[in-house]
Image: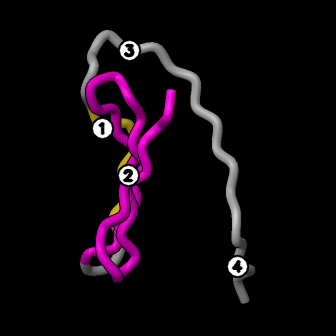
Amino acid sequence: MLRAYSSIHIDFMFKTREANGLIIFNGGKKNDFVAVELVSGHINYVVNVGDGTVTLRDTL
């Protein structure tokens, strides 16, 4: 049986020449997915696990 966690901590360090791009994408069944993207120089974490898409944007 898999354990369920209520929190996660992920660190990224990268240097890019572009202000926009897809960094990581993992698609699951149907519409389920997790993505990390760069939009206008800011990181977005985008996830859909069946209840619609949620986007978390950096505050830096």
Mark 3 and mark 1: span between their CA atoms? 11 Å
The answer to if 46 sits in the magenta stretch is yes
Counting residues from the start of the chain, the first of labels 3 and 4 encountered is: 4
Mark 3 and mark 4: span between their CA atoms? 34 Å
Q: Which residues are magenta?
A: 31-60
> Badge 1 local density, few (<14 within 10 Å), some, or many (20+)?
few
- Image position of 8 (left or right of 28): right
The label shown at residue 35 is: 2
Give the quarter of the image for residue 17. top left
Secondary element type, mark 3 = loop
Residue type at numbered disc 2: Ala
Residue type at numbered disc 4: Ala
Mark 4 and mark 1: span between their CA atoms? 27 Å
Identify the residue position indicated by label 1 in the image: 22
Identify the residue position indicated by label 4 in the image: 4
Whether 2 is drawn above or below 23: the answer is: below
